[in-house]
Image (spheres, rainbow, N blue to C red):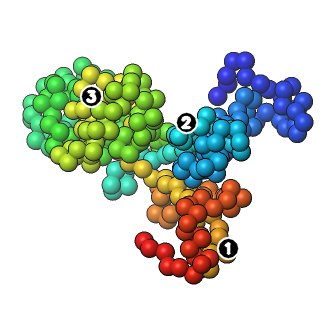
Amino acid sequence: VYIEGGAEDDYYLLLDEPYYCKNSALETVEEVLLIKGASLEILFGEDMNRNGVLDENENDGDVSEPDDNRNGRLDRGFYDYVTIYSEEPNENSSGEQRIDITSNDSRQELATLLQGVGLSADQFLMQQFLRAYSFTSVIDFYIKAQGFLGLTAEQFKMIENEISATSYETVPGLINVNTAPKEILMCLPNIDESDAEVLVRVRNSDNVDTGSIAWVVDALPEKASDIGRYITISSYQYSADIVSVSGDGRAFARHRMVIDTMDDEMKVVYWKALKHLGWPLDPEIIEKLRDGEEIED
């Protein structure tokens, strides 16, 4: 991605520790720190040890590192909200390529698919629908088929894993609307804080079927089509912060890992030691181990 006014080699080569401008995709989130204007404060906020907990030194103003506003709240950077590992296979449960609803060549396949879930056998009506509309996303297809053909949420769930809005083998960068925090949902087009709160509230309701993306249409009927291209209900990459400690509390290790489950075999795509950031959990845990006490679950 080229950003007008962004720094190039003539800036980076004059730094105290010079390097060439990469002008390419990032390979880790931490690589953001090599970009002009980025900083540890922007990336990690007050949570420099990356444990997600407001530690004493993160709530004491400028007494100790890091500098913080002493407001009793952990103000985190954007590290935990972004990733470079976001991709899902564009295939159905049988491993076959999904039908591209944006292609005119897929009309007959779509007609057969819709008729297979009990919609009208009227070929003229079906072809009229497929010729009258273009589709920007699976959600957009559902909304238009619902209005024109009477496609129900139950019928849509039967076919949604068979269709896609692209012919690519994989689809990168989608946001899992079933799990994303409010802050991420607010980054979607035309979604404000109240919309994001609605999505979080609805998906947590007992009577909502989050196994189908159709729930988003019920939650935000006026805006669902706007965000359809950017969301999914599936995740294939997962991160974990792993801490292990010896029985006597005298040694510990900490690593962050990201695993990719897109293929048949799980792959570790990121592994980094974080012991240098210090003990990330409640200090009482390690103190009890050193005193020979048992740790309750």
Q: Is residue 49 above or below residue 255?
A: above
Sequence-wise first label, 2 or 1: 2
Where disc 1 sits, the SS reads: loop
Q: In this view, does 142 lie above or below 296?
A: above
Nearest to the eye among marks 1 and 3: give it: 1
State the residue in front, 283 or 208: 283
Q: Residue 71 carries which label?
A: 2
What residue is drawn where x is 63% and y is 61%? Answer: 279
What residue is drawn where x is 32% and y is 38%? Answer: 200
Characterize the local packing of mark 2: few (<14), some (14-19) or many (20 or more) Cα atoms within 10 angstroms.
few
Characterize the local packing of mark 3: few (<14), some (14-19) or many (20 or more) Cα atoms within 10 angstroms.
some
Q: Which mark is residue 2?
A: none
Q: In this view, does 163 lie above or below 91?
A: above
Q: Tell me residue 176's x, y (percent).
A: 40, 43
Quarter in which the N terminus is drawn:
top right
Is residue 273 something that shows in the picture?
no
Sequence-wise first label, 1 or 3: 3
Give the residue at mark 1. 251
Q: Which mark is residue 220?
A: 3
Q: What residue type is labelled 2?
A: Asn
Q: Is residue 193 above or below residue 215?
A: above
Characterize the local packing of mark 1: few (<14), some (14-19) or many (20 or more) Cα atoms within 10 angstroms.
few
Q: Which amino acid does label 3 sit on?
A: Leu
What residue is drawn where x is 27% and y is 28%? Answer: 220
Is residue 207 something that shows in the picture?
yes
Quarter in which the C terminus is drawn:
bottom left
